[in-house]
Image (tube, helix red, strand yellow):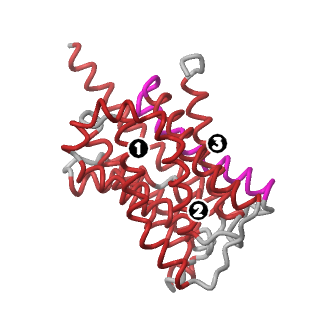
Amino acid sequence: MNRFPPILLLLFATVLWGGNFVIGRAVIEELPPVTLGFFRWCAAFIIFLPFAWSTLKRDWSIVRKHLVIIFLLALTGVGAYSVLVYIALHHTTSINASLMNTGAPIIIYLLSFIFLKERLTVLQIIGTVISISGVLFIISNGSLATILNVQFNTGDLIVMIAVLSWAIYSILTRQYSQKLPGQSTFLISIFFGIIILLPFFIYERATTTFETTWSFASISAILYTGIFASILAYIFWNNGVAKLGANHAGIFMNFIPVFATIFAIIFIGETLQFYQVVGGLLVVFGVYLTTRTRQAEKVSDLKRNIV
């Protein structure tokens, strides 16, 4: 992994995550959403376990002290986020879902302001307003009447809930990043995620009229999401962040809708609409403003420390 430059590692991760949105949309006729999410994390656990087992044994005393936090990480990041995205993809396009996913940093800033008492600068507030405007533009299909009449696509609203869940997961990760070992925490969070999803999986199997189709496409989707969108993307991203730094790496998340859009157009025939372009640019520009502010603050702090 050391042979690859950090920028390339981060791009690899966003390519794989971009593909996750398209895969989830491509198999909506074959796999119910909870079934896909459940088998995704089962596959990830089985494949990741041999690689992380020795590390887990070494880290177990630390992991055991933070099982409640790891459970919350599993609930928000493994269980809720991934399954809500798959549910949303039954009602909206992969392009829409991936575009709105870029608004996660904005929600993280807002939650940090509300619960962690982190201050917001004027530029961050402006960036937040711009990004929220972009999200509203996307989910309203660029129609002011849709916004005024509060007639939003169900799938888009579910994506917003998923993004909120991811924001909570990200804040918890940031708060405990220095206390929790990465690989062991990831393995146990997958395990907890499977336990969380199990009753929903059983309920879905018992009540849905949706017939699961076991085919090359559905099995490939489970393997792709379990191996590439979960394990490999995680490894690429964490190594890239370790080399480049979290603040610089964060902006690469905006490549996810770029790759998702490309894949959606090429492989499943989705078309890029004007309102998606405008809304996506607004969201990305808003995130850029807030990220730029945070980086400027760190440079300012560094200068003060030097002086």
Q: Residue 222, position in %: x, y?
A: 63, 56
**Residue 246 shown in magenta:** yes
- Give the quarter of the figure containing the C terminus: top left
Dot 1 amino acid type:
Leu
Residue at label 2? 97
Instruction: Judge left or right: residue 189 versus residue 208.
Output: left
Res. 56 image quadrant: top left
Dot 2 amino acid type:
Ala
Q: Residue at the location (27% across, 51% down)?
A: 112
N-terminal of the pair, mark 2 or mark 1, is 2
Instruction: Judge left or right: residue 91 versus residue 75.
Output: right
- Mark 1 → mark 3, Cα distance in angstroms: 23 Å
Q: Around disc 2, counting alpha carbons within 10 Å, would you say few (fewer than 14), some (14 to 19), or many (20 or more)?
A: many
Instruction: Judge left or right: residue 184 versus residue 273.
Output: left
N-terminal of the pair, mark 2 or mark 3, is 3
Q: Around disc 1, counting alpha carbons within 10 Å, would you say few (fewer than 14), some (14 to 19), or many (20 or more)?
A: many
Magenta extent: 242-267
- Mark 2 → mark 3, Cα distance in angstroms: 15 Å
- Give the quarter of the figure containing the N terminus: top right
Q: Nearer the viewer, residue 20 or 102?
A: 20
Residue at label 3? 15
Could you tell me if residue 277 is visible in this image? no
Question: Do the numbered discs 1 and 3 sit on residues whose CB atoms are within 8 Å?
Answer: no
Residue at label 1? 187
